[in-house]
């Protein structure tokens, strides 16, 4: 990866680049927290809380799969959405049951929390070494 142009000059090493990217995309901000008295965040302390039903149904799984392009951006398992769609109702029911079991047990496997981010070069953008600072 080429050197990055930052507000402090050029960043060459991986740690320098990581710091430059962190500063650019995750800036630190000052906030006033003086009016926050409840630091335990117990369910009983929230006024007018909204109950979100934790129930997955196969029809919702089906609509989520249908909303995805069939052969674009497969997950870490490299299984295209078109293949998942083609698996039919049994897969959708199994995924709904798995989601419901995770919610009921309060356990979400680490594998479900993994993501892969792919940066795609935009058409007409010749260089990505300037962070826009």
Image (cartoon, helix red, strand yellow):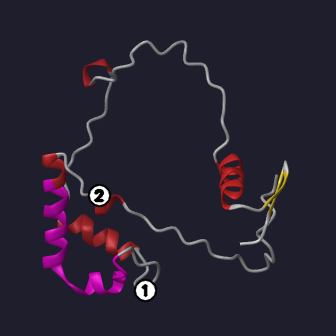
Determine the residue positioned at 52% across, 67% down. 117
Disc assigned to residue 71 = 1
Say if the magenta span includes residue 59: no
User: In the image, what residue occupies the spot 18% across and 45% down?
Assistant: 106
Image location (x, y in percent) of residue 91: 17, 76
For image coordinates 14% across by 70% down, the residue present is: 93
| Residue 21 shown left or right of residue 97 in the figure | right
Q: Is residue 126 above or below residue 106?
A: below
From the viewer's perspective, is residue 89 above or below residue 112? below
Residue 109: x, y in percent?
24, 57
What is the distance, in whole Å, between disc 2 and disc 1 at their CAs? 25 Å
Mark sitting earlier along the chain (2/1): 1
For the N terminus, the quadrant is bottom right
Residue marked by disc 2? 110
Secondary element at image label 1:
loop
x and y percentages locating residue 30 in the rendered image: 66, 26
| Nearest the eye: 81 or 1 | 1
């Amino acid at each position: 990866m080429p050197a990055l142009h930052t507000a402090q000059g050029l960043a060459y090493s991986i740690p320098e680049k990581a710091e430059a990217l962190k500063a650019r995309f995750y800036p630190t901000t000052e906030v006033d927290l003086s009016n926050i008295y409840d630091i335990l965040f117990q369910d009983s302390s929230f006024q007018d809380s909204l109950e979100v039903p934790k129930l997955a149904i196969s029809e919702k799984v089906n609509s989520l799969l249908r909303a995805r392009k069939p052969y674009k951006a497969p997950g870490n398992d490299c299984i295209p959405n078109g293949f998942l769609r083609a698996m039919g109702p049994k897969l959708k029911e199994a995924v709904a049951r798995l989601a419901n079991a995770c919610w009921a047990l309060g356990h979400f496997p680490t594998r479900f929390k993994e993501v892969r981010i792919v940066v795609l070069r935009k058409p007409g953008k010749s260089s990505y070494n300037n962070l826009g600072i």
